[in-house]
Image (spheres, coloured by chain):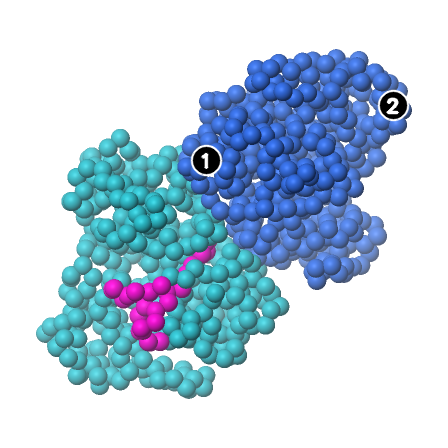
Chain colours: A cyan, B blue
Amino acid sequence: MVPHLVTALTGPINELEQRILESTPVIERWFRLEWMEHTPPFYSSVDVRNAGFKLAPVDTNLYPGGWNHLTPEMLPLAVQAAMAAIEKICPEAKNLLLVPENTRDTFYLANLAQLQRIFYMAGLNVRLGSLSNDIKAPTTIELPGGDKVVLEPLIRSKRRLGLKNFDPCTILLNNDLSAGVPGILEDLHEQYLLPPLHGGWGTRRKSHHFKAYEEVSKRFGKLLGMDHWLINPMFNQCGQVDFNEDAGMECLRSNTDALLGKIRRKYKEYGINEKPFVVVKADNGTGGMGILTVRDARDIDNLSAKTKARMAVGQAGQEVHEVIIQEGVLTNERINSAVAEPVVYMMDRYVVGGFYRVHADRGVDENLNAPGSSYVPLAFEQSAQLPQPGVKPGASVPNRFYMYGVIGRLAMLAASYELEATDPDAEVYE
Amino acid sequence: MVPHLVTALTGPINELEQRILESTPVIERWFRLEWMEHTPPFYSSVDVRNAGFKLAPVDTNLYPGGWNHLTPEMLPLAVQAAMAAIEKICPEAKNLLLVPENTRDTFYLANLAQLQRIFYMAGLNVRLGSLSNDIKAPTTIELPGGDKVVLEPLIRSKRRLGLKNFDPCTILLNNDLSAGVPGILEDLHEQYLLPPLHGGWGTRRKSHHFKAYEEVSKRFGKLLGMDHWLINPMFNQCGQVDFNEDAGMECLRSNTDALLGKIRRKYKEYGINEKPFVVVKADNGTGGMGILTVRDARDIDNLSAKTKARMAVGQAGQEVHEVIIQEGVLTNERINSAVAEPVVYMMDRYVVGGFYRVHADRGVDENLNAPGSSYVPLAFEQSAQLPQPGVKPGASVPNRFYMYGVIGRLAMLAASYELEATDPDAEVYE
């Protein structure tokens, strides 16, 4: 089952799908050349929104959870991609240390079990080293599906990180470091630490990512001869906002107003009969904390005390000062009346699968990855099939997924640019 | 549906399956290290025979046809592997020239259409250049499934091979060169020609391959702590046989006798209650021409004139002088009463799928890939799923396919050794 699009099966997105399918060899070669110059993130997931008239990434996760939502058919692709990734980084490796989030949520732990399975099949012994102080000895947790995971305490020596009797070549983070970089992960120069520490939300900024994505989408738009706005969410940013102190509100209001104006002009250009909106959120952090949907800049002046308090606190409790104002992209995919949002999963440079977040209680302009969101994962059907050139645009499930996979990879490429630009150890040639 | 094994679900093969599953990270790492030193063939397929007490490759094809027998679920794996292969060889490539066999058999042409689809999705424009003199202009052939292929005449310049308005970076042969290397393929030093010309049956010898495979299987046996005979078909060879002139028959008889004796001792060691047999065939060529099953060396002296005439002619009509005498491996897989033989497909270093040749009219000790064999292809089910550690040995379909994939890759590795050893351009360090 795949969500249907509310929007008619004509219009910009179906033209885009057509263009993308016809251009497959050109697109794949373009990616191939990009990956000669740039290093893909080890793994990633990208939230995509399909408005019918526009298709854009809204979040790129460098520490993807949710691998347990992929179907058994997708796993061999993930294993094959993991093999390719390992081979490049540390082919002689026997051991991989996976460092998870500090949570005992069984859905999250099922994600860890799945990652363990993938890397085991790719040829690595995988063990889980917890950053939590509560894990003082190997702790086995049984999962509802019959799987189990063992969390173990990390052991740090002067130069290396490992577990008792387990010295890994590579350390893979599945923890987005929202609370900052723990000392135990610093100054590890003998082991591969992936993603690099500056991929954590202590350093990362959404505005850096979407700046890089804008550049990528412009070049891709040129390659395919299309307006890059069709795949690019516009944004502005404000660097010194304090919701508690009402500071920086003028910046927020004027930037919101300017962005709404730009969206309005684009809607007019394409004859889109929707009300523009923007999404205001912390420039760092993920997971849908403190997100504000704004349709009129004047609303910024009338935020309730409750809303301000909510907006002031970011992930892991830090204060929010840097804010991104992003063009809102409707999701017009539906399962019956429930809103659905596709998430694309990638390992190394390869799309390995994806699923829909399906949420009955949320609106088309709301974030479906909000805390406590009770979304239902719906694995992409037939995503493990090749596109079908020649099928009517909008009518082929594999064709739609191929398009999502292209957009997901554009966002992944942007993340690669972003990580290069923010690398503290990068050599600068001037 | 997957063939059941006639043999009981106990015995050496189930122990082997168990051992292989438990050793997955060790095996995958071992392959990873091998591929650091050796180059996998661009693509390959391996015929495997499962006797219940023994599992061995019997033929390794470096120009695999039959890609059309893979299921839609397997294709994304093939595409991903093709991407990895292309990236290493010629990442900037736009064009791939595929050189097929000279046949208009629609099953074979469907194989070409499938290969075209795979490489198109991997990011290449693919066109078919025929070696046949009958193709003097682009010739479109419609296939029963709705696909079509266009065969075009090759155009050779002094340094390059291509088609009209089509200059490829890479030329991929799907023609095993049984009739020798055509001049049009020689002295191409500016383009990648894959597989290399010495992979054709003009140079290749089964005995070279199985010598290399024996070496590989010994090392693999040591890695897993098992007798390599369980996966290695023994063989002898005779270099100067002439069936028409009755020359070399003494060599044939004594080697057959010696090999039957060795098999008998192995059967005794393992308590196998079967009658040993050997298979006599041309040391070069494939496709099941002139194959002789022998259970008693004295039968060599009593070959009928008809049998001798059949044995004297190899593929593409050449005389047979070099002969391999190979340990016969029963196939004990059955669909109802029909004999089934698995074929494993690989692209670059990756197993991407496979199918069973199912043949109602043939015996357990006969070749199922004989000319005119009306085998039914049965795609591996659930091969696009990961193994299931912990399931009872012999009872899990994905586990059996994982084992077949390991054996297939061992044969592919042997082919890599073989091609290195026979490379006329290899630098020799003495």
Residue A80 at x, y = what percent? 47, 46
Is residue B37 visible from the viewing direction of this image? Answer: no
The secondary element bearing badge 1 is classed as: loop
Q: Which quarter of the picture shows residue B405?
A: top right
Chain assignment, label 1: B
Which secondary structure class fits the magenta region best?
loop
Q: Which residues are magenta?
A: A349-376
Residue pictured at 69% horizontal, 52% vertical: B112
Q: Magenta span has A357?
A: yes
Residue A330 at x, y = what percent? 37, 76
At label 2, the amino acid type is Ser
In the image: residue B392, left or right of residue B421: left
Residue A312 at x, y = what percent? 16, 69
Residue pictured at 33% horizontal, 58% vertical: A61
Mark number displayed over residue B392: 1
Evaluate whether label 1 is on the same chain as label 2: yes
Residue pictured at 46% horizontal, 31% vertical: B18
What residue is pinned by disc 2? B304
Chain assignment, label 2: B
The secondary element bearing badge 2 is classed as: loop
Mark 2 crowdedness (10 Å alpha carbons): few <14, some 14-19, many ≥20: few
Q: State which tag comes first along the sequence, 1 or 2.
A: 2
At label 1, the amino acid type is Lys
Is residue A151 visible from the viewing direction of this image? Answer: yes
Q: Magenta span has B232?
A: no
